Amino acid sequence: MASAIMSVAAGVRRMCAAALILVCLSTPPRAVAEPPDGATVTLDGTRYARVREALLEAIAEEGLASPLVSNFGDMLRRTAGDLGHSDALYEHAEIFIFCSIAVAARLAAEARDNIAQCPMSIAIYSTPETPEKVVMTYRLPPGQSPGARMAAETVARIASRTYEHSFP
C-alpha cells in the first residue's frame, strides 16, 4: 500500500514538473520575476545539497560531461569587503555550465556567431533567510531556429529532471 502511494506521488510530481517546464517554455518572460529568455523555479521544502545532486544527475542522464561549476556565492563573499556589497546575499549559490556537442554543432551550422550560445547554464541558490527554499534559474538561447529549440529542450529536460529528483 505504501509503495503504491509513493508511486502515485512520484507520478504526480513528474506530471507537475513537466507542466511547469512547459509553462516556462511557453510563457513570455516577465520584467522582474524571470530573467530574460529563461525561467526561475522555486523548489520549496528541499535542501540545497539534494537539488545540487539532482542537477548533476540530470546533466549526466542527458549524456553530457560533468559540468564546470562556478562558485558564485563564494566569489561574492570573497569580494564583499573590497566592493562594498553584502557577504550574505546567498547561503549557497553555484552556476553549472555544460554543453551538448549535438546542440553546439547544430547552432554552429546555423550561424557561426552562435558559438556564444553554448555552453548552457543552470544556476541554483538558497538564501540565508530561507535555506529550505532552493531556486533554480536558467536562460534559454535566443531565437526560434532548430538549434535554439534543441538547446531550449535540452535545458528544459535537465531542469525537469532536477525538479523530479529534488524531493524524497
Image (spheres, rainbow, N blue to C red):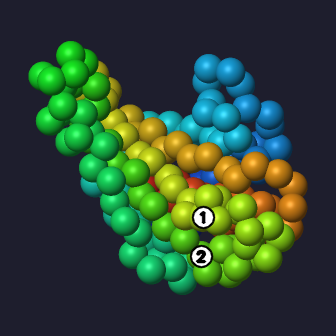
Element at badge 1? loop
Q: Is residue 41 above or below residue 59?
A: above
What amino acid is at disc 1? Cys
The numbered mark at residue 100 is: 2
- Residue 167 to residue 37: above or below: below
**Rendering quarter of residue 63:** bottom right
Counting other residues with Cα less than 10 Å from the Cα at mark 2, is it few (<14), some (14-19), or many (20 or more)? some
Going from N to C along the chain, the mark reached first, 1 or 2, is 2
Which residue lies at the image location 55% right of the left edge and 71% below the top edge?
Answer: 99
Q: Which residue does the image show at 51% across and 79% down from the upper left?
A: 64
Q: Secondary structure at mark 2?
A: loop
Residue 129: name its quadrant: top left
Which of discs 1 and 2 lies nearer the camera? The answer is 1
**Left or right side of 8 for 49:** left
Q: Position of residue 122 (x, y in %)?
A: 50, 53
Front-most of residues 149 and 43 = 149
Q: Is residue 166 left or right of residue 100?
A: left
- Find disc 1 in the rendering and name its residue: 118
Name the quarter where the C terminus is drawn.
bottom left
Q: Quadrant of residue 155?
A: bottom right
Total marks drawn?
2
Residue 87 position in % (x across, y down): 18, 25
